[in-house]
Image (tube, grey):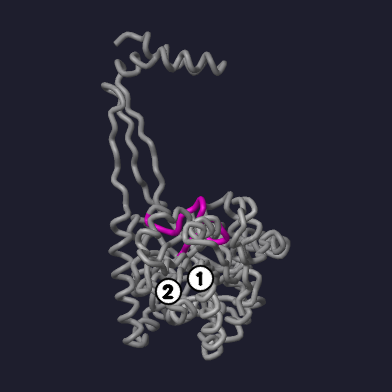
Amino acid sequence: MLARLDLRDKKISTAELRRALPRGGTDVDSVIPAVEPVVREVRLHGASAALEFGRRFDGCSPRSVQVPPAIVDAALETLDPTTKQALEEAIRRVRRFHSAQKPADQNVEVAEGGVVSERWIPINRVGLYVPGGKAVYPSSVIMNAVPAQEAGVGSLVVASPPQPDNDGWPHPTVLAASALLGVDEVWAVGGGQAVALMAYGDEELEPVDMITGPGNIYVTAAKRLVRSVVGIDSEAGPTEIAVLADGSANPVEIAYDLISQAEHDPMAASVLITDSEDLATAVDREVEQRYAITLNADRVREALEGQQSGVILVDNLNEGIRVANAYAAEHLEIHTEDAPAVAERITNAGAIFVGRYSPVPLGDYAAGSNHVLPTSGTAAHSSGLSTHTFLKSVHVVNYSKQALQDVAPTVIALANAERLPAHGEAVSARCEEPS
């Protein structure tokens, strides 16, 4: 099922690797012409336009954009107890990890009487997008809301598509997860219209300052269109897993991990990097035998047979690490001897899962880490969602007169070198005035 890319006995540069590695063909630019009118109409007409687009694209329209609190509360009251317990445990673990991420303010005396401080200030209002297409994602409510809450964000809104089977409101499990987290503002709107409405608001709905959360290509295009108005976390592409493995790995476990990621989306990427041809053959055999029994078998097959998935054969583990860093996977599993030592050598990955007892599905739900992660190779330069995402750093400068006088020659010399003498004069005026 899985295509093979054989890099053995080849000296291949990083530039060649980037061209050769399996990647999907997501083209956000191609849908901009379709999304731009949606964003424009919502900017001009607010909730009424968003509801109309929901009727057109989702096949239903709720009575209002904002879900009544009674509907949210009822979703929690009727939630299956086992699911509720699982969500509570996931929230506990994710909160414990993200609460430890908040950085402390710093005060640094760079010279006598000259203090520069760094303050971390939470974003005022944030919009959290939770998809609702091929699957139900209460876990995405957790992964977005918890770090925002731990950062101290003052106001949160969750937006999720209306569901025909739920009277036009978002899926009950998404509503229940919101209730568990104390998020009392939920909007029944999805797609590009949700992003636009969160960015621009209207007379009754307050716009946000930042939008986070994964979504399909239309959501991504809308985030691109509004990012000059609000902050965004990233332009997320289809999900992906890479597995770096040697001959000691268990092919059945790897097969299940590749299948589990493929069931997200027909464009999901599942990649095995290994120096063992025997393992590659065994994994391919196990995938072929096991994928058909999954609920989403057709989707899995399409993803695994797509150009974005495959097996990459390398000469040795060192080359495997090099390939893994060049691929920069959203999720990277390490199935090798001394996996922790190998993980230390990985520099590019959204999240690293070490050893056979740390599979990606653990991180999707309840490891405590975040599952909103950089895709499409952007892990080479970007991080996943975290408490830091919802904080902005502000530098506070506080100098005494003597401290300014001491550094004045430096400032004046640099201002003159840049042919900006008024900068130096602004400093001189303060240094020359009487005490």
Secondary element under disc 1, as helix, strand or loop, is: loop
- Quadrant where the N terminus lies? bottom right
Quadrant of the image occupied by residue 180:
bottom left
Q: Is residue 169 visible?
A: no
Magenta stretch contains residue 375: yes
Does any portion of residue 92 appear in the rendered image? yes
Q: Locate residue 76, reporting x and y percent.
A: 36, 81
Per the rendering, the mark at residue 86 is none
Q: Is residue 106 magenta?
A: no
Circle 2 packing at 10 Å, graded few (<14), some (14-19), many (20+), is: many
Left or right for 153, reference 232: left
Q: CA distance from mark 2 to mark 1?
A: 10 Å
Question: Which residue position holds label 1?
Answer: 276
Relative to 25, 434 lies left or right? left
Q: Quadrant of residue 83?
A: bottom left
- Closest to the camera, between mark 2 and mark 1, is 1
Residue 330 image position (x, y, % from top left): 50, 63
SS for callout 2 = loop
Picture residue at 30% right of the left edge, 28% below the top: 115
Identify the magenta region: 372-387
Q: Could you tell me which residue is drawn at 68 percent across and 62 percent down?
A: 27
The mark found on residue 249 in the picture is 2
Q: Nearer the viewer, residue 56 or 390?
A: 390
Q: Tags 2 and 1 in contact by the CB under 8 Å rule?
A: yes
Q: Type of residue at label 2?
A: Ala
